[in-house]
Amino acid sequence: MATAAAPALVYRAASVRYGERAALQGVDLTVGPGEFVAVAGPNGSGKTTLLSAALGFVPLAAGTVALFGAEVGRMPYRERARRVAWVPQTEPVRENVRLLDYVLHGRYPYLRFLETEAPGDYALALDTLAAVGLADRAGDGLLTLSGGERQRAILARAFAQTTPLILLDEPTAHLDIAHQLDVLARVRELSRQRSVAVVAAIHDLNLAARFADRIVVLSRGRRVADGAPADVLQTELLERVWGITAERHRDARSGLPYLVPHRLSRRDAPPGPGREFGPVHVVGGGGAAAPLLRALVDDGYRVTAGVLPLLDSDTEAAEALGVPAAVEAPFAPIGEEARQRHRELLAAAVAIVLAPFPVGPSNLANLEEVLPFVGRSPTFCVEAPVGAGPRDYTGGRATALLGSIVSAGARSVASVEELRAALHALAASSSGGPRPAAGGAPAS
């Protein structure tokens, strides 16, 4: 018999095999009452299998899984259904059953043979529909619901089951961002208000960090990380498990970490004239840096960028190209954290490139940070195209800073092609002699 103090869910050296393939390998995991645990990992890492093992849907090759102190494999189905509810990723709908009746299916574990639902069951079903924002659709057919509404209906059925544990398999997979936030917020509220334990497979690490108490990461069927979001959301883990690079930031409002991912450089691409020379640091914004980033990555240079605002087209280009970048919130002054990251990238650069980006009070710090590094690394200022609009919105301060940068030794280049030629010469000279200064003469 389970005790009140028993953990909601316990895996002990749990292993599952599908033929010759190991889907879970010796997983140990404990979930406490009322705890919200997010399970993350690449496709095929074992997330769905982990949840299926807790439901008794798949047999264990080794180990045990227990619900509130009772081993799943020895538990009658009806008793299991009173302890754990299941929200699948998708559920085929074949009949246009009334939504209220669909939610009432969650009360079946509590009904005796041939017994019908009591008024209390109907009241509970209506309450759960209200909890997911579907009270006004109670009389509608299930087939009339949108995909997002149908997912909330499945959630309502699980809520109506009134179990102390809910398992969800990627509940946000087919939802837009608004409904993703809505569904997870409702699950989080249920967990806190009723002390319901929640285990949810979630692809998006940033969403997991926002709502979960813990994040468990699986890779090839093994548990490779388990801890608080602030501890698990690390760039090293993302590269090791998912094979992509990322930058880690902290949301100023919530204090929670979030990752800005990039894809890794194309290892199979033919080497360009850069031959992995770098890093070449590109300073831009407002779309001015994107053509430079594409050209330099295509030429084989290792490239960094910053400070770029989130949601900016230059930031999107950097993410798509796998270019590490210092980033800041859009329309906000560049903060000290972003400035420090920018300084680190500037210090590591073997060359600096200034794109012809518009400069206002919020991003003037980009030029301020570049100036001290002009004498240390060859610096190139790409001129704005003929007919381009104004780029100084600081009352002349940006123009003065650009003049100081040129006076300190930066070289003006008229086009992307001229920049590529200059960097090609720089890369060639670095492999066979002293590195030239920005003007092209060898450094003394």
Image: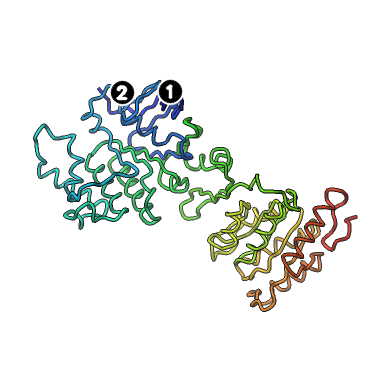
- What is the C-alpha distance between the residues marked 1 and 2? 13 Å
Q: Is residue 49 left or right of residue 410?
A: left
Q: Position of residue 320 (x, y in %)?
A: 58, 54
126 and 146: which is toward the camera: 146
Query: Tag 1, which secondary structure?
Result: strand
Q: Is residue 438 left or right of residue 156?
A: right
Q: Position of residue 89 (x, y in %)?
A: 35, 43
Query: Tag 2, which secondary structure?
Result: strand
On the image, which quarter does residue 379 sit in?
Answer: bottom right
Please name the residue shown 58% across and 64% down the image. Answer: 333
On the image, which quarter does residue 9 sit in?
Answer: top left
Residue at mark 2: 71
Q: Residues within 10 Å of mark 2 (few under 14, many from 20)?
A: some
Q: Residues within 10 Å of mark 1 (few under 14, many from 20)?
A: some
Q: Earlier in the sequence, mark 1 or mark 2?
A: 1
Q: Position of residue 222 (x, y in %)?
A: 48, 30
44 and 282: which is toward the camera: 44
Vertical order, 134 against 80 (above or below): below
Q: Is residue 144 left or right of residue 338?
A: left
Vertical order, 364 against 83 (above or below): below
- Name, please, the residue furthest toward the right: 444
The amino acid on which the numbered mark 2 sits, given as a three-letter code, is Glu
Residue at mark 1: 13
Q: Is residue 318 left or right of residue 106?
A: right
Q: Quadrant of the N terminus?
A: top left
On the image, which quarter does residue 436 sit in?
Answer: bottom right
Vertical order, 86 against 434 (above or below): above
Please name the residue shown 44% across and 30% down the image. Answer: 23
Please name the residue shown 61% across and 56% down the image. Answer: 318
The amino acid on which the numbered mark 1 sits, given as a three-letter code, is Ala
Q: Quadrant of the C terminus?
A: bottom right
Q: Position of residue 362 (x, y in %)?
A: 60, 67
